[in-house]
Amino acid sequence: MTERKTIQIYKVSHNKLRDGDLVIADNVNDAINKFNDYYESDIDIFPDGITGVMLFLTYEVISEANK
């Protein structure tokens, strides 16, 4: 049996990061939440510094399930 899954990668731009950061997420809100969780203990990266979120790449992954 073949299984298909779509992986979405979002680019989160922040005023303290030169190139932004890539996040695997289901949607924009999920990307923001994962970004904030990752930088939760960083003293320079705050949630209010996010300047943009955009869908960067979408991959379709196909895998063969074992029988």
Image (cartoon, helix red, strand yellow):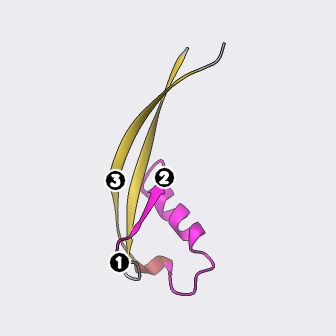
Tell me which amino acid carries mark 3. Answer: Leu
Is 35 displayed left or right of 49 in the figure?
A: right
Q: Does dot 2 land on a helix, a strand or a loop?
A: strand
The residue lying at 45 percent from left, 80 percent from top is 48
Is 45 displayed left or right of 13 in the figure?
A: right
The residue lying at 56 percent from left, 74 percent from top is 39
Q: Which residue is mark 2?
A: 24
Q: Residues within 10 Å of mark 2 (few under 14, many from 20)?
A: some
Give the position of the C terminus as an image quadrant.
top right
Is 36 displayed left or right of 13 in the figure?
A: right
Tell me which amino acid carries mark 1. Answer: Arg
Tell me which amino acid carries mark 2. Answer: Ile
The residue lying at 45 percent from left, 42 percent from top is 7
In this rendered view, identify the residue nearer to me: 3 or 49.
3
Q: CA distance from mark 1 to mark 3?
A: 18 Å
Residue 63 place in picture, x, y as percent: 52, 25
Q: Is 60 included in the stretch rendered in magenta?
A: no
Q: Which residue range is magenta in the image?
A: 18-46
Quarter location, residue 66: top right
Q: Earlier in the sequence, mark 2 or mark 3?
A: 2
Q: Which residue is mark 1?
A: 18
